[in-house]
Image (cartoon, rainbow, N blue to C red):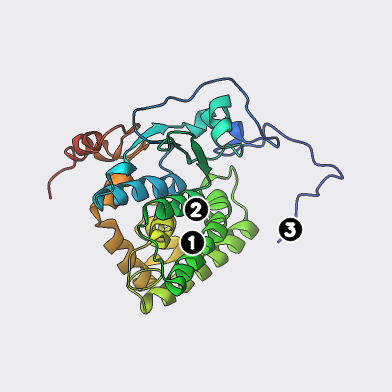
Amino acid sequence: MTNTYTPPKVWQFDEESGGTWAKVNRPVSGATHSAELPIGEHPFQLYSIATPNGQKVTIMLEELLALGVTDAEYDAHLINIGEGDQFSSGFVAVNPNSKVPALMDHSESNSSTRVFESGAILLYLAEKFGKLLSKNVTERTEVLNWLFWLQGSAPYLGGGFGHFYAYAPEKFEYPINRFTMEVKRQLDLLDKQLADNKFIAGGSYTIADIAIWPWYGNLVLGKQYDAGEFLEVDSYQHVKRWAEEVSQRPAVQRGRIVNRTWGEPWENLANRHSASDIDQILQLKPKV
């Protein structure tokens, strides 16, 4: 294998580096333009797009509503990351890291709370409403083990494998091999965990499943990077069993389409302001 690139003594930003996200990538933080965020009528205001990280939060909110937690009603506003909406002054005020999703909780009369990073949002909502996270110390710790595992592992799948396999302007053997090996190790780990457990952290559905499914569930179901055959995802039978079971949950089917602007008409809901918004879109799904 020949190395055709020699790093310079001092790296310089090259705006023409190419790739799917080249026009919004930059080496500095902060706002690029002034724009206020919309605010709906519900306690929770979500600013997001239906990437795997975005799906975590909309699925969580829909699961809470399905459990009867009416205080979890929310407005979900599309943040078009391809156009740089995440760099508006309004979004940066909610998440200075300029990544989706970002959540504002206006439910308290005296103050509002901003929550950013998808894992932090899941934990915040679980603790606020006492749902999908056990109060038993041992069970809670196992859920958090897997929640933090996901937060550390998903970048190898998305920014690593997904970028070099699906989005990079050129294909290079070394990074694809490197990240394929790691993703297959992760799938093997999940497969062994799910061989002995119905759900990720044991017998109960929790925020660990909500965090991991949008990344690894979508991957093995053929909805991520078009890489199923390449990764031999059918060999991870326990992950596939779990992924298919979770995909049948009504709240997952509802949450995965919120802030989505691609795919079939019945899975494409840019903004969500009420349950009826989702109901109307899902009615477009062909009857089997």
Question: From what the image shows, is residue 283 above or below residue 206?
Answer: above
Q: Give the mark toward the camera: 3 or 2.
A: 2
Residue 226 shows in this picture:
no
Task: Point out residue 244 in the picture as x, y percentages from the top left corner.
Answer: 29, 62
Q: Which residue is mark 1?
A: 147
Question: Helix, strand or loop at disc 1?
Answer: helix
Q: Which residue is mark 2?
A: 119
Residue sitting at x 44%, y 70% = 190
Sequence-wise, the earlier of marks 2 and 1 is 2
Q: Which residue is mark 3?
A: 2
Question: Helix, strand or loop at disc 3?
Answer: loop
Could you say which quadrant of the image residue 260 lies in? top left
Residue sitting at x 33%, y 43% = 72
Could you say which quadrant of the image residue 263 lies in? top left
CA gap, disc 3 to disc 1?
39 Å
Of residue 253 and residue 16, the one placed in the foreground of this image is 253
Q: Quarter of the image containing the N terminus?
A: bottom right
- Amino acid type at circle 2 is Gly
Specify few, some or many for label 2: CA neighbours under 10 Å numbering under 14, 14-19, or 20 or more: many
Task: Point out residue 185 in the picture as x, y percentages from the top left corner.
Answer: 52, 70
Residue sitting at x 20%, y 38% = 279
Specify few, some or many for label 3: CA neighbours under 10 Å numbering under 14, 14-19, or 20 or more: few
Are circles 2 and 1 on residues that touch, CB within 8 Å?
yes
CA gap, disc 2 to disc 1?
7 Å
Question: From what the image shows, is residue 238 above or below residue 40?
Answer: below
Sequence-wise, the earlier of marks 3 and 2 is 3
- Amino acid type at circle 3 is Thr
